[in-house]
């Protein structure tokens, strides 16, 4: 099989992640069948998809006609046989519990073609554990998206101890072919790559505030209007490369001793401060109150602003 043989994708589990995956696949011209356990859950999936499509249409990432095509490419079902029977690629996004993931895989294997690729959206479970009782563990990979998958291109690929390396490559090529940016973990690693980077930075965010160096609002502002703008374009190694006439090597030399002194002073604790929420919540409430009106002052308003900015940024990245 190669990537062009993949015409039909089954999304198993249609919650926050599964319903967003369905849009991603349908936007790229694939037939999608979305499975969930009952009609009530499917109704929620449908509502969630329409909300995402509303934002895409409102911010002109898709036209009304394109929206209709996307909607008509997605079929909803409570029948596992119907969901996976014709699929060449199966994206599982069920609850993050090992026994449920194993039971979903067992059901899928009953009805799916033995050649189909099975990709789990798991955030933290090991593929080797999910596939421990599988008939075809060699067909299974971990494919961790960033929420929401139809907007954020990143997908982190992991393999289990029995995953076929050619199949992993095929999964990689497939995601790339539908506009995702796949990264490959060469070793199992809790939190994968992106969430670890995020948490490492968040430890320093918390520490700066807890030590009284700056407010919650100012640490956010320092990130958004400083490194965050550059990070939306290039990764940190590239930023280093462009930051000095001597490239990354020159930048490392320039940082030299002062970099080491900062590192010595930085947080290294392994348990988050117990009273962080008490400190951070009033700070973030104040931050929201201080935003200009065009950003918004409530969670809903700020989330809409975030989505609009994300869509505009993705257009600049030629991802939408
Ligand atoms: N939410 C995130 O930010 C995020 C990000 C990346 C990855 N993930 C991962 O994606 C997966 C799904 O997370 P979510 O946030 O969409 O959860 P969710 O609770 O929103 O959705 C889970 C869906 O699975 C369905 N489900 C329950 N039992 C099932 C079964 N036996 N078979 C099939 N479907 C079943 C539920 O009805 C629900 O619609 C998890 O593995 C999670 O770790 C989540």
Image (cartoon, grey):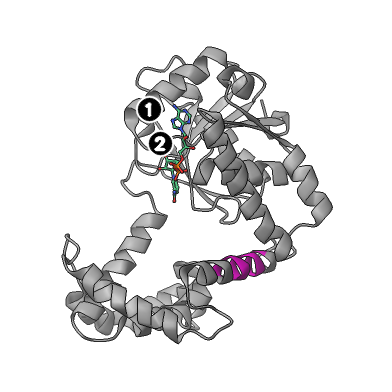
Residue 161 in sight here: no
* Residue 311 shown in magenta: yes
Residue 293 in which image quadrant: bottom right
Question: Taking the image as drawn, is residue 304 in sight?
Answer: yes
Residues packed near mark 1 inside 10 Å, few (<14), some (14 to 19) or many (20 plus): few
- Mark 1, secondary structure of its residue: helix
User: In the rendered view of the protein, which quadrant contains the N terminus?
Assistant: top right
Residue 71 % position (x, y): 73, 42
Q: Nearer the viewer, residue 294 or 252?
A: 294
Mark 2 C-beta to ligand 1 under 8 Å: yes
Query: Toward the viewer: 190 or 167?
Result: 190
Disc 1, disc 2: CB below 8 Å? Answer: yes
Q: Nearer the viewer, residue 42 or 255?
A: 42
User: Is ligand 1 closer than 8 angstroms to the Cβ of mark 1?
Assistant: yes
Q: Is residue 164 magenta?
A: no
**Residues drawn in magenta:** 306-314
Q: Which residue is mark 2?
A: 95
Q: Which residue is mark 1?
A: 100
């Amino acid at each position: 099989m190669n990537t062009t043989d993949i015409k039909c994708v089954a999304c198993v589990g249609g919650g926050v992640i599964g319903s967003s995956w369905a849009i991603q696949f349908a936007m790229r011209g694939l037939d999608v069948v979305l499975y969930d356990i009952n009609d009530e859950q499917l109704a929620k999936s449908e509502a969630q998809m329409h909300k995402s499509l509303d934002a895409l249409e409102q911010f002109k990432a898709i036209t009304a006609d394109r929206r209709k095509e996307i909607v008509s490419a997605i079929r909803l079902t409570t029948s596992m046989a119907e969901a996976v029977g014709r699929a060449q690629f199966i994206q599982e996004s069920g609850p993050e519990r090992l026994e449920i993931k194993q039971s979903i895989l067992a059901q899928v294997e009953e009805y799916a073609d033995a050649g189909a690729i099975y990709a789990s959206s798991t955030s933290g479970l090991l593929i080797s554990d999910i596939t421990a009782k599988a008939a075809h563990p060699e067909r299974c990979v971990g494919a961790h998206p960033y929420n929401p998958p139809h907007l954020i291109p990143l997908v982190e690929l992991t393999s289990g101890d029995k995953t076929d390396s050619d199949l992993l490559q095929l999964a990689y090529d497939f995601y790339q072919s539908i506009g995702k940016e796949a990264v490959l973990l060469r070793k199992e690693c809790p939190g994968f790559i992106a969430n670890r980077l995020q948490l490492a930075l968040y430890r320093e965010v918390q520490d700066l505030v807890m030590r009284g160096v700056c407010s919650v609002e100012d640490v956010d502002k320092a990130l958004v209007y400083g490194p965050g703008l550059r990070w939306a374009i290039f990764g940190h190694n590239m930023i280093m490369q462009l930051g000095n006439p001597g490239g990354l090597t020159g930048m490392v030399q320039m940082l030299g001793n002062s970099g080491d002194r900062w590192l010595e002073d930085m947080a290294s604790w392994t348990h988050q401060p117990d009273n962080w929420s008490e400190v951070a919540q009033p700070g973030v409430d104040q931050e929201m109150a201080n935003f200009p009106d065009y950003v918004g002052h409530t969670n809903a308003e700020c989330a809409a602003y975030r989505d609009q900015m994300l869509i505009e940024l993705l257009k600049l990245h030629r991802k939408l």
